[in-house]
Amino acid sequence: MSLVSQLWQQLTPYQQAKRWFVGFSGGMDSTVLLHLLVKLKQQYNLPEISAIYIHHGLQAVADSWPDHCQKTCDELAIPLIIIKVKVTKQASIEQAAREARYHAFSQIVQKDDILFTAQHQNDQAETLLFRLFRGTGVRGLTGIPKSRPLTTGTVVRPLLDIPYQTLKNYADVNHLQWIEDPSNTDTSFSRNYLRHQVIPVLQSYWPQAVNNITQTAKHLQEAQQLLNELAIQDLIVAQTTPLYPWLSIPNLRLEPLANLIWARQKNALAHWLAKYTLLPSTVHWQGWQDLLNAKESAKPIWQLQNAELHRTNERIWLLMDNWLNKPATTKQPISSEQEISLSNNGIVTIKGDLPNKPLFVSYRQGGEVLQLHNRGHRDLKKLFNEQAIPSFLRQRIPLLFDKQNRLIAVANFPQWRDKDIQQNFSFEWLPNNNLY
């Protein structure tokens, strides 16, 4: 089967997309992909095709590459979008460049758009070996997915089953011109070392090594699908009802998870966490064990990459973004019915008859007391304990004070207000739930 025919089979599910984009680096792989798509566009009624070149600026020699890409696209009558990005310095420059690249792609690719990238079979084999040597689990050994969401669009890799040599032969036969990135021969980069030093040795003994490695990735993808189904079943049992209608922080019941064997706990949690944060390394999973075994009174927290897992009220709660930052303690004055934006803490809305005195919104500092109707003076801490308010909420719930710093109302808890406040008064808080 010709390479054009193989590609056409991969494109069938995406022919009704709004637009097609090609991640075009000017290298051999993406040049072949772009050339193939243009050839198919001449034969079939396909969506509009554009190319995107991401200029990382990591090498001086790369400054001429946008001109090469523009020339190639002009010859193919394809629009080219050139985006300059800044790569942040971190341990892996490859990973940093990839993150910058896909962030830029996400600014262009919109709803119902497809972004085609040119990873091929050899890339898949390199990825599998790279992750294997790092000690990754089944999820990591599934390799590069053929497609995945990107904002509201989709990234598709239609050449993933095609060997590098097949693409190279096509490029030579069609006299294509491409960029040779000098960094691709630098074996100080892990992937280049695998590409130039490891895989050729494997192929000298096992000629089908690359194909067989990628077949293993497919087997592991099937295994991961089964693990995902098991995780979904376990998570259904651990589902919760909302603690409060205004609070939508992701949370699960602890007991059903704790009753699972260790491997199923990790599998269920990994499936749940993957939607929100980077998954912990093998060693880092000890944090879950510590959280599970801690006493409730210890208020245990598991620190994740960009999130925290809290345990309270027989639930686990995943806190992210603004929920990890304490709200500003600045006193915000209230003079009439109004909606107030709180720093790092959503908004509060005040309606009805306000007491005829200066008021302000702030937060708990300790020692607050409420004069309740028919209950007398009640310590706020004891009220929170009676209602089992989660500890991470206690410092965030907005409070209404008068100018004598006397507490007169607690947001979202109308039963906790000063005895002299009118019944038609409301003090509502909407947290930053939209972050999830």
Image (tube, rainbow, N blue to C red):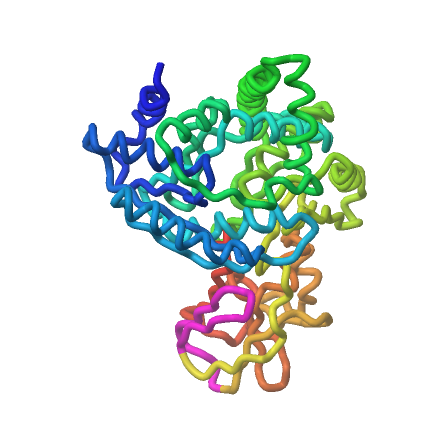
Let me know if residue 6 is in the magenta part.
no
Magenta highlight range: 337-356
Which quarter of the figure is the N terminus placed in? top left
Residue 154 in the image, given as x and y percentages of width and height: 39, 38
Q: Nearer the viewer, residue 400 or 75?
A: 75
Residue 285 in the image, given as x and y percentages of width and height: 74, 37
* Residue at x 69%, y 21% (from the top left corner): 201
In this image, 11 relative to 180: left or right?
A: left
Q: Quadrant of residue 132?
A: top right
- Callout count: 0
Q: Please say whether residue 350 is visible from this viewpoint.
A: yes
Q: Nearer the viewer, residue 386 or 168?
A: 168
* Residue at x 67%, y 48% (from the top left corner): 92
Q: Please say whether residue 265 is visible from this viewpoint.
A: no
Residue 241 in the image, given as x and y percentages of width and height: 52, 40
* Residue at x 62%, y 46% (from the top left corner): 317
Q: Is residue 345 placed above or below 265 in the rendered structure?
A: below
Residue 196 in the image, given as x and y percentages of width and height: 65, 31
Q: Nearer the viewer, residue 9 or 330?
A: 9
In this image, 14 relative to 191: left or right?
A: left
Q: Is residue 281 placed above or below 7 in the rendered structure?
A: below
Q: Is residue 57 placed above or below 347 in the rendered structure?
A: above
Let me know if residue 339 is in the magenta part.
yes
